[in-house]
Image: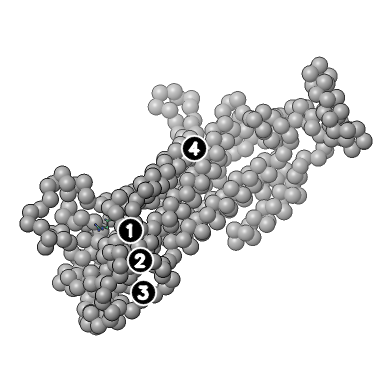
Amino acid sequence: MTLWSGRVDTEVAQAVWNFLRADDAELLQYDCLATRVHARRLHEGGLLSDSELADVETALDWIAVEGGTEPDDEDVHSTIERLLGTVGRKIHAGRSRNDQVAAALRLYVADACLEAVTAIRSFAVSVLARAEEEAETPMPGYTHLQRAQPITLGHHLLAWVEMLERDRDRFRFAAEAARPWPLGAGAIAGSTLDLPPPPGAQLRNSLDAVGDRDFALDYLYASAMLATHLSRVGEEIVLWCTSEFGFVRLPEEAATGSSMMPQKLNPDVAELARGKGGAAIGRLTGLLATIKGLPLAYNRDLQEDKEPVFAARRDVRTTLGALEVLVGGIEFDHERLAAACNDPLVSATDLAEAMVAEGIPFRDAHEHVAAQVRDGTFEAPESPSRRVAPGPADVHAAVAEARTRFDA
Ligand code: ARG
């Protein structure tokens, strides 16, 4: 039976029902929490007795863990009302599914953000350990994917950590954006019942409270940025493990074989991390497009917010988890890295700068070295201990600082 069966004589057609139903069981525990808050308001307002409140709370404990949806439930809100039984007939006083779903989704997103922050920290800490190990490993830095200047592998890995740190901050921001509560807004204009305000920070305007999904977009944006960064990390690993680069060997616990070619060890984890970026960006632009042009306040279009948010949470968790294993176990080929770095041309800028230090204008020095490169007479500066910027000591210091910022 629907929550609105009193209004109609006949049930909706099966095809319509299938279309309307929300696939939102993932919200169950969050909706139970929001329902508990609402039940306490009803109790304080004299609309639920002590024993009814106790019944609701006991039932919600069970529903949050064991509750299952049924084909006749329109959405998770219907599931909860059904499973609450007799007292469930009282629970919806003073609320609507419009403020209920907004509350549940906010709780869901806040939790997903915390989970992301924790997973990012864990991955970043393992990258930091690798950066520290590789603080002294020379490698060529690339621009335009052409060898450019000498750096250390530690310095390169620290760039990944910087990206992750910004991602962590974006998820923290999204968690804050999800905090204010819409409960009490009802369908659109609150209710005539004399209920105490829900606890916590409240959204100020009841139309905005039920129509706002900025917090979900903030979450999808943070997820899309993270996915974009992990995509770049994935691409670098894909390149590095080719025979052409040969900078890394994949750990067997994070590599795949080929069903046909016996010799292959493939970087599927890195490729999938790269590929996941596409869907993550699509989820953000998809929900933006859903919300764009919607009149205030609640419209059923907003039910479409859930799938992208659920999928983003799953991808954040699984991508970071798999990459952590991959990066933790990857073996760097120091000989290949050193050989690539010993390409004398990566020191061309250093030579031009050495001339500048002796008083030659930079453009003259640049032209002089470029001419040597052109006619094949270029020789790298003698000193084998030429400055590698930033050097091992800088990497160690940067690792230590990053550890403090990640509380590690
Ligand atoms: N399942 C709906 C959603 O996710 C809940 C709100 C339905 N509200 C309504 N007035 N039909 O958005």
N-terminal-most mark, 3 or 2: 3
Q: In which quarter of the image is residue 373?
A: top right
Q: Name the residue under label 3.
A: 198
Amino acid type, callout 4: Arg
Q: Quadrant of the C terminus?
A: bottom right
Quote the CA–CA distance across marks 1 and 2.
Answer: 9 Å
Badge 4 element: helix
Task: Where is residue 296? Give x, y as percent.
Answer: 34, 56
Residue type at mark 3: give it.
Pro
Q: How far apart are marks 4 and 3 (CA)?
A: 43 Å
Residue at 7 percent across and 57 percent down: it is 9
Residue that badge 1 annotates: 297
Can you give x and y, in whole percent of width and height, for residue 8 in the image?
10, 57
342 on left or right of 59: right
Residue 380's place in the image compared with 47, above or below, is: above
**Left or right of 381 in this view: 281:** left
168 in relation to 349, above or below: below
In what quadrant of the picture does the N terminus appear?
Answer: bottom left
Mark toward the start of the polypeptide (4 vs 2)? 2
Circle number at residue 274: 4
Residue 127 in view here: no
11 sits to left or right of 80: left
Position of 374 with respect to 2 (left or right) is right
Evaluate if marks 4 and 1 touch, with contact meaning CB atoms under 8 Å apart. Answer: no
What's the distance in space between the residues labelled 4 and 2, CA to CA?
A: 41 Å
